[in-house]
Image (cartoon, grey):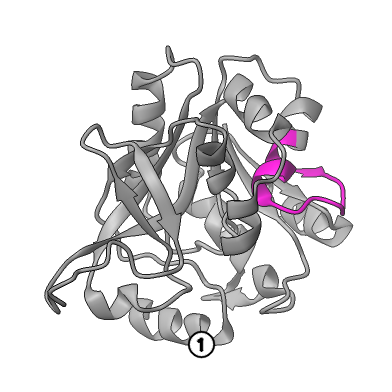
Amino acid sequence: MIIIPARLNSSRFENKILVDIFGLPMVIRTAKAVSILDDVVIATDSQEVVDLATQHDIKAVLTSTEHQSGTDRINEAVNILNLDDDEIVVNVQADEPFIEAEVVQAVINQVKELKDRDFTMVSCYKDINSEMADDPNHVKVICDDSGDAIYFSRSKIPYHRDHYNSANYKGHLGIYGFTKKSLNDFCSFKESLLEETEKLEQLRAISNSCKINMVHVESNSFGIDTKEDLENALRFFK
């Protein structure tokens, strides 16, 4: 099941999930982009978004207004929906209206491969250049030789001592795959100091010695965090 956490109010871009993306509200555009892969549910804190989803024949679940992260929100949703512990749950951010279905499918496939782990969490990254890596809104990740994440940061990591301008960096895409049990486990962990410092919820898993396996994908999509991101995306995808 694909669940899209959709908090209406955003500190950087108010009501951004409702902005028009080529004729559809952003959250609806995102849901339709991945609906060919699996059942899609929008998990939201807003009755307005529930009603909007209903208008577009998309299932929605009303969740608490108190959640601090999208993953906590979808965790409430999977428990409301009473999913089995081994159900694959994919978190696709509401601000990814241009995400390619192939990228989400790659995450689903990797969760299937790793379902026997005690804790199963998968995400993905794409290659980005040095200039893009300078932007703190583009989260970077470094991985070990097994493909598991070592650290995520808004800073430019790794640091290239010799300052290679042509160096490629791993740009994290905010898509996460879990088993339902692992999602429940993740949300039982206390918020970590690293998570609070970087404002990156995935660091909660790393702080609790849990592995996040990373899949290398190719994608033109990027999350829309600011009005400038929106303008750039509409120009690019037009």
| The image quarter in which residue 10 lies | bottom right
- Relative placement, left or right, of 57 versus 37 is right
Compare residues 221 and 196 and report the one nearer the observer: 196
- Percent of width and height locating residue 162: 12, 74
| The image quarter in which residue 82 lies | top right
Quarter of the image for the C terminus: give it.
bottom left
Quarter of the image for the N terminus: give it.
top right
Q: Residue at x 20, y 69 (%)?
A: 160
- Percent of width and height locating residue 105: 37, 38
Question: Vertical placement of 114 versus 138: above or below?
Answer: above
User: Can I make out residue 188 in this image?
Assistant: yes
Compare residues 100 and 238 and report the one nearer the observer: 100
- Relative placement, left or right, of 221 versus 183 is left
The residue wearing badge 1 is: 228
Q: Residue at x 38, y 20 (%)?
A: 114
Considering every residue shown, the one lying at the far front of the view is 161
User: Can I make out residue 202 in this image?
Assistant: no
Q: Residue at x 66, y 74 (%)?
A: 16
| The image quarter in which residue 13 lies | bottom right
Q: Residue at x 60, y 58 (%)?
A: 94
- Percent of width and height locating residue 97: 50, 63
Count of numbered marks: 1
Q: Residues within 10 Å of mark 1 (few under 14, many from 20)?
A: few
Question: Vertical placement of 113 versus 67: above or below?
Answer: above
- Which structural element holds mark 1? helix
Let me know if residue 67 is in the magenta part: yes
Let me know if residue 127 is in the magenta part: no
Magenta residues span 58-75
Q: Tag 1: residue type? A: Glu
- Percent of width and height locating residue 91: 56, 43
Compare residues 230 and 210 and report the one nearer the observer: 210
